[in-house]
Image: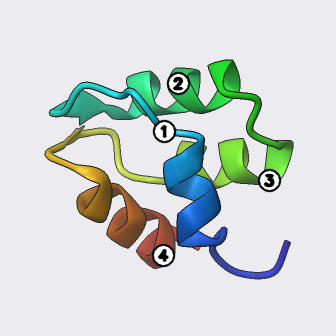
Amino acid sequence: MAGAPNPIELQKHLKGVDYPAGKSDLVQAARDQGADDDLVKALEKIPDRQYDGPNAVSKAVTEAS
């Protein structure tokens, strides 16, 4: 996958996450929702901090890719 994952795919795999959420929570939620390896790797690249919502996660994934 070139660049950041599709934001719609990203949010689909983070459905049900309770925000604020940490990086490890987001990675685990994506795995639990059946995200592919590229999406999980993209989440693993984001800074290890608390994210206050889906938009913050999307922004961090885009900046980290």
Task: Assess disc 2: are there few (<14), some (14-19) or many (≥20) residues with their C-alpha within 10 Å of its C-alpha.
Answer: some
Horizontally, residue 44 falls left or right of residue 36, namely left
Neighbour class for label 1 at 10 Å: few (<14), some, many (≥20)?
Answer: many
Residue located beneath label 1 in the image:
14
- Distance between the Cα atoms at labels 2 and 1? 6 Å
Q: For mark 3, does the 10 Å Cα neighbourhood hold few (<14), some (14 to 19), or many (20 or more) residues?
A: few
Q: What's the CA distance linking mark 3 and mark 4? A: 13 Å
Query: On the image, which quarter does residue 31 sit in?
Result: top right
Q: Residues within 10 Å of mark 4 (few under 14, many from 20)?
A: some
Q: Amino acid at mark 2?
A: Ala
Q: Position of residue 47 (x, y in %)?
A: 36, 50
Residue 62's label in the rendered image is: 4
**What residue would you read off at disc 2?**
29
Question: Would you say 25 lies left or right of 35 here?
Answer: left
Q: Mark 2 vs mark 1: which is more N-terminal?
A: 1
Q: What residue is pinned by disc 3?
A: 38
Could you say which disc has been placed on residue 46 in the image? Answer: none
Q: Quadrant of the N terminus?
A: bottom right
